[in-house]
Image (cartoon, rainbow, N blue to C red):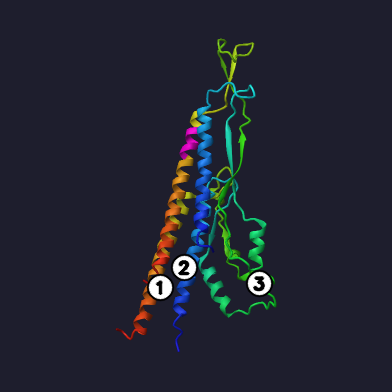
């Protein structure tokens, strides 16, 4: 039997990525005038692969909820520092504000698109549940 | 991934740019101040920014799984320092603050530099307002999921 939440889970991960990336880009723009700050980004494929693989992988057994959990599943490990030494300003800052604004817009549009698809998916299931009425 | 983390990041930047704007206004206002409280001419002030990192307890709570991973804190003003460059010397023997040779020390404020910095600060402010609005539209969009 098909799992009705498979697709919804996939959309959820895509939204998670866009949400996290929005945060990272906001931080880049906030630090556009901070000396020595390096621009960062979150790679979509790596993020998706990681979060999909996470479901199949075996979790480290912890016997107490306060035990330190396996940190490889932490999405923060996927954040990459962009290599844009060519655009480096005199204060070692690598934030390119135009590029960041473009990325921000991309992320927001992507987020809108995926959430729309997610809504449609949910509505499809609503139709099924209501037997098409 | 807290819901309002991105908003906090952008608002920290707005606050920082505002402090920068205040300091620039102070510099321009005192461009001709030849005598301050300590008897010296006014020294130009510079705002130093720093990336706001998480506190130790935030990171520890994350590692022991007590809190969700939220990774950024935005930007903060690290310090407001004085520009050590020399004062501008102007020959004006009639000035009450003139030295024995008739020279007056004027503040090391360069109006053109301050105006350029002011434009930069206001542009950065605008960029962060845009970021804030985009985050806002993303949050309202999540409320509409399933409608």
Sequence order check: which comes first, mark 1 or mark 3? 3
Residue B57 coordinates in the image, percent (x, y) = 66, 59
Prevailing secondary structure of the magenta residues: helix
Q: Mark 1 points at which residue?
A: A118
Quadrant showing the N terminus of chain A: bottom left
The quadrant in which residue B45 appears is top right
Residue B85 to residue A111: above or below: above
Q: Secondary structure under badge 1?
A: helix
Quadrant showing the C terminus of chain A: bottom left
Estimate how packed mark 1 is, as few (under 14), some (14 to 19) or many (20 or more) residues with alpha carbons within 10 Å: many
Q: Mark 3 points at which residue?
A: A70
Q: Name the residue under label 2.
A: A15
What residue is at 59 percent from the left and 26 percent from the top?
Answer: B42
Give me the C-alpha separation between circle 1 and circle 3: 30 Å
Q: Secondary structure under badge 3?
A: loop
In the image, which disc is placed on residue B95? none
Q: Are marks 2 and 1 in contact (CB under 8 Å)?
A: yes
Residue B22 to residue B74: above or below: above
Q: Give the range drawn in magenta.
A: B114-119
Estimate how packed mark 3 is, as few (under 14), some (14 to 19) or many (20 or more) residues with alpha carbons within 10 Å: some
Q: Secondary structure under badge 2?
A: helix
The quadrant in which residue B103 appears is top right
**Most foreground residue, B135 or A131:** A131
Give me the chain letter of mark 2: A
């Amino acid at each position: 039997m098909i799992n009705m939440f498979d697709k919804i889970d996939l959309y959820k991960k895509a939204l998670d990525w866009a949400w996290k990336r929005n945060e990272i880009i906001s931080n880049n723009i906030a630090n556009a005038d901070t000396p020595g700050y390096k621009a960062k980004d979150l790679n979509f494929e790596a993020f998706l692969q990681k979060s999909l693989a996470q479901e199949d992988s075996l979790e480290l057994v912890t016997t107490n909820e306060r035990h330190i959990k396996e940190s490889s599943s932490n999405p923060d490990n996927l954040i990459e520092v962009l290599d844009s030494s060519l655009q480096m300003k005199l204060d070692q800052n690598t934030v390119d504000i135009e590029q960041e604004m473009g990325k921000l817009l991309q992320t927001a549009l992507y987020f809108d698109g995926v959430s729309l698809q997610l809504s449609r998916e949910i509505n499809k299931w609503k139709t099924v549940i209501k037997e098409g009425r | 991934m807290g819901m309002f983390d991105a908003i906090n990041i952008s608002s920290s930047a707005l606050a920082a740019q505002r402090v920068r704007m205040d300091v620039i206004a102070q510099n321009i206002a005192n461009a001709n101040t030849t005598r301050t409280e300590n008897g010296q001419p006014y020294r130009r002030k510079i705002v130093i920014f720093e990336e706001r990192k998480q506190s130790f307890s935030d990171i520890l709570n994350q590692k022991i799984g007590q809190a969700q991973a939220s990774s950024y804190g935005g930007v903060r003003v690290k310090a407001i320092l004085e520009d050590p460059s020399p004062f501008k010397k102007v020959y004006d023997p009639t000035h009450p603050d003139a030295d024995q040779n008739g020279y007056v020390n004027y503040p090391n404020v360069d109006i053109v530099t301050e105006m350029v910095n002011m434009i930069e600060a206001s542009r950065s402010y605008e960029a962060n307002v845009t970021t804030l609005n985009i985050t806002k539209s993303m949050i309202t969009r999540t409320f509409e999921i399933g409608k």
